[in-house]
Amino acid sequence: MKYAVTGSTGHFGKYAIADLKKQIQPGDSIVALARNVEKAKSLYPEGVEVRPGTYEDPDQLTDSLKGIDRLLFISSLPGAVMPRIDQHNNVVQAAKAAGVSFIAYTSFPKADTTEAPLAADHKATEDLIKKSGIAHAFLRNNWYLEDEMNFFEEASNGEPFVYSAGDGQVGWAPEALYAQAAVTVLTSENPKAVYEFAGPMHSYDDLAKALQKVTGKQFEVASVSDDEFMANLRKYVPDQADAAMTMIQKMIRHHDLEEDTTDLADVLQKPIPSLEEQVQAVFETSKK
């Protein structure tokens, strides 16, 4: 069996390659697809074949996917020159042309039913994969705890913990666990078509309390309006990032990330760490 991972030099891709090395059977092989081939070769000097994998180049993708049996398709970031859905279409069509037999795609929570604006490209990509006829599993990842580093940094400095997500809840879990689950699905014999991957649901107030326990610092926790949240963000983040982060808070306030699922723990065959344990681990990692 030959496995391939797109976006192999990103955080998720690096976690996935590391897990693949542990999970593949003797005789199986791994291909890392990367925009920056030299960077990938430096990351994977042995045990992994590196091939070019630029989402904007369908011919290159088709060549690089030849001989691949199973593909972990990591979604690209929005905001590039080529629209994300066009990039994703290139990957799907290349996989079909190359004869890939299975795709595991990193999607968005409840992608087929949610009205969250961030889900649109993912729903469209799921539809493309369905229409391709390729066997698949949609890995609908909730939220990575590492996405909240801005809150971590403020808390570490004893500054106010300011959010506008209200009582909306999030299924935080470490990115490494999502990647481990993705690889487990990729290498399994009879995967489901859809996985709603998430940790236990928590609010930002819960996150603030966990940060207070881990840091040992007492800081103000303030649930504010979107305008107040954005004004506070401008102290810490670049222009334009404040609008994107505020949109995410609004999405969470509308309960778009809330779901009742045990898929992540079931696939990993172990409980998801508590929020406090997750926060502690992120702090320990950031100090290394």
Image (tube, rainbow, N blue to C red):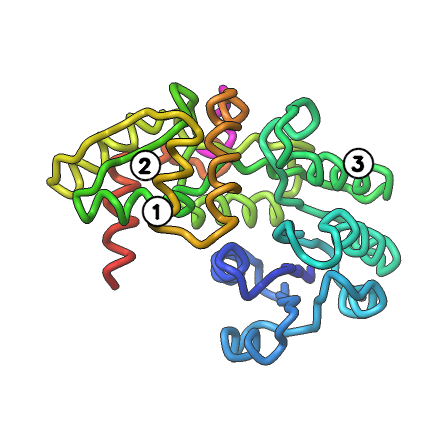
Q: Amino acid at mark 3?
A: Asp
Magenta residues (range): 260-265
Which residue shows up at 71% across the image and 50% down it?
A: 84
* Magenta stretch holds residue 184: no
Which residue shows up at 56% across the image and 50% down it?
A: 183
Mark 1 and mark 2: Cα distance apart in space: 21 Å
* Crowding near the residue tagged with mark 3, few <14, some 14–19, many ≥20 C-alpha atoms within 10 Å: few
User: Where's residue 128, x and y in %?
Assistant: 81, 41
User: Where's residue 10, x and y in %?
Assistant: 53, 61
Which quadrant would the N terminus be assigned to in this image? Answer: bottom right
Q: On residue 128, which mark appears?
A: none
Q: Secondary structure at mark 3?
A: helix
- Drawn side of residue 281 relative to residue 25, left or right: left
- Drawn side of residue 128 relative to residue 216, left or right: right
Q: Nearer the viewer, residue 265 or 39?
A: 39
User: Where's residue 9, x and y in %?
Assistant: 55, 66
User: On the image, numbered disc 2 is attached to which residue?
Assistant: 273
User: On the image, numbered disc 3 is attached to which residue?
Assistant: 127
User: On the image, numbered disc 1 is attached to which residue?
Assistant: 150
Q: Amino acid at mark 2?
A: Pro
Query: Mark 1 vs mark 3: which is more N-terminal?
Result: 3
Which residue shows up at 46% across the image and 31% down it?
A: 249
Circle 3 or circle 2, nearest the eye: 3
Quarter of the view holding residue 203: top left
